[in-house]
Image (tube, coloured by chain):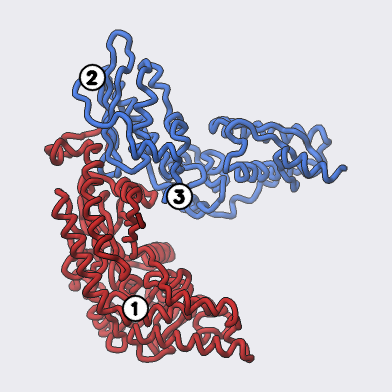
Chain colours: A red, B blue
Amino acid sequence: MDAIYLDNNATTRVDDAVVAAMLPFFTEQFGNPSSMHSFGNKVGLAIKKARMQVQELLGAEHESEIIFTSCGTESDSTALLSAIKANPERKEIITTSIEHPAILNLCTHLEKEGYKVHYLKVDERGRLDLAEYARVLSDKVAIVSVMWANNETGTLFPVEEMAQMAHAAGVLFHTDAVQAVGKVPIDLKNTAIDLLSLSGHKLHAPKGIGVLYLKRGVRFRPLLRGGHQERGRRAGTENTASIVALGMACEQAMQHMHFENTEVKRLRDRLEAGILAKVPRAFPTGDVTNRLPNTSNIAFEFIEGEAILLLLNKFGIAASSGSACTSGSLEPSHVMRAMGIPYTAAHGTTRFSLSRYTTEAEVDRVITVVPEIVAQLRRLSPYWGETGPATEPEKAFAPVYA
Amino acid sequence: MWDYSDKVKEHFFSPRNSGAMEDANAVGDVGSINCGDALRLMLKVDPDTETIQDARFQTFGCGSAIASSSALTEIIKGMKLDDALKVSNQDIADYLDGLPPEKMHCSVMGREALQAAIANYRGEEWKDDHEEGALICKCFAIDAVLIEDTVRANNLSTVEDVIHYTKAGGGCSSCHEGIEEILTKVLAEKGETFSPHTVEIKEEAKPAKLTNLQRIKRIEMVLESVRPQLQRDHGDIELVDVDGKTIYVNMTGACAGCQMEALTLQGIQQKLMEDLGEFVKIVPSRAGSLSRAVCHP
């Protein structure tokens, strides 16, 4: 039986057309785009084309607003560190409590260097309070960084509106759009977004390639200085094969945008409804009416996520979990905790993320397997009785230490 | 994905002795749903012989928590209570052919459930004496709480101190930033500041020049000082030969062929260099005999 891959928010399969497009750049097109001879020249033209393909998907006004980087994390770091370098008198940063570690751990580090970071809270559905945001926006803030879509729940943030608000307050706005690009339409030229990060491997391009979008005119300080590549804004010889691949992947994403938001969404909804119909004490997390079309995050109460994943894996199904054990820490996902999901459910959250390759047969198979797995683990759980949760689970199981 | 042994996977996919036991006369509950793992161990103890006749478990937790619970019940069935109390978390991990460092706490939970169950049988109160923190050192599975407590109890002030007292940071050294942060925090409580420069090796008057005999004795002293740590992990080291700058040793017991052998040797080499005040190279004698064969045909 073929494996079923429902972990596309972690990474995606590189599209066959994308692989075909990049391969010549390892062999006959190996030249350095900076070179004057014909070996380099053709590569330079290929990069120019890729830049325009990315520009098209992002709806950027100018191709020179696209800076190729090595990954989403590099784009995020470049954006925030540039903003604080360019505005040394501003000592505050605004972000959210459910950002990716690429932003959160950088912010924690900046706090140690004396920055004040405002972490916007979310409600039980993972939504922000824009009034709270308005209160902390001021001319002391160097940059606002808010993800476009959350990686665990798929919940979309109103980044366009938030960018407008930042703009009105004279503050730079960055969005980590790693999960959103290729899944929802984006038209940057009609927004006030100053900086945006994307990562190739989330949209069927290879790992090791990312983009920082930098709106023309925004003051910028490079992270890597050196050669003149990327107009001196990101030194280092271009990763030509991957840049060409990303360009092709963006073109493909553009073509599949409608499919993603109709067919992929239909399968996601079928999967979620199918599981919830069969599994008691399970619920979807996040803002289910306003989220990415491919993501479903379901909390299974009274069981632990890593155990779920191991059993799913035995059936050839790949998913991911917000449980503590999958990260090696003792705390469940910061996203689930920020939403106030009770511990009884947070440890059992399981994320299914689809792609345009997902089939209905795969979805139906997952719908039959998941209820068995959940029942099997609940039989082992001290919090679960014969047919449902032990009456008052917290009392039924009251250990000596907690 | 974790690098689980086949034994761990086997005990997870087909756990032994799972489910509630109606006629248990000893029950130990440990963990909590907040921490992500919880274990109820149920025993049937023969009151006349104090022998564990049967053991069952219910576990909320990850793969290795379920496997550790399963292993525990298999280990203790048929044991006398006093013998069962001697079962350590390392025994549980060994039974499963090892656990990843991040998962060692699962075996600790098993041991604690056993102690709690026996205390319950004997009508005693069992107190948990350990609190877990974020994992800092992944080479030796040392968490933040242990490091913090050790720093406080022993007035430690340098990363080197922490390595010597807890082993944390003595392997790949990636966690030194985390250790420095703990030191900064604890020193700040005393109104002191952490300075990475205090680690300068104390300006002991370097011995002019050691005789060969003195030098070998010094080397043996250093090896002696690390021996308890190695023995704790069921290993050992012995000095085979000293040839100029090269020190040949034999790693025995669990150390032989251990994946961390190179790391362990690196740490010992560092200590030897600090102590001798000169550059030396430590080489496992198998490799050593080969290279010597080449050097002295």
Instruction: Report the residue at 45% width, 82% height from top.
Output: A67
Residue A388, image x and y in percent?
A: 13, 41
Residue A392, image x and y in percent?
A: 13, 39
- Tell me the kind of residue under disc 3: Ile
The residue indicated by pointer 1 is: A253
Most foreground residue, A120 or B118: B118
The residue indicated by pointer 3 is: B182
- Neighbourhood count class around disc 2 (C-alpha, 10 Å): few under 14, some 14–19, many 20 upward: some
Reading the chain from its start, which is encountered first: label 3 or label 2? 2
Q: Is residue A198 left or right of residue B201?
A: left
Residue most toward the front? A1
Instruction: Report the residue at 44% width, 85% height from top.
Output: A51
Eye-nearest disc, 3 or 2? 2
Residue A22, image x and y in percent?
A: 50, 77
**Marks 3 and 2 on same chain:** yes
Chain under disc 1: A
Q: Is residue B264 left or right of residue B47?
A: right
Work out how far the residue at label 3 is from the one at label 1, CA to CA, in angstroms.
46 Å
- Tell me the kind of residue under disc 2: Asn
Instruction: Report the residue at 41% width, 76% height from top.
Output: A79
Q: Is residue A210 above or below residue B161?
A: below
Identify the element where label 2 is drawn.
loop
Q: Are marks 2 and 1 in contact (CB under 8 Å)?
A: no
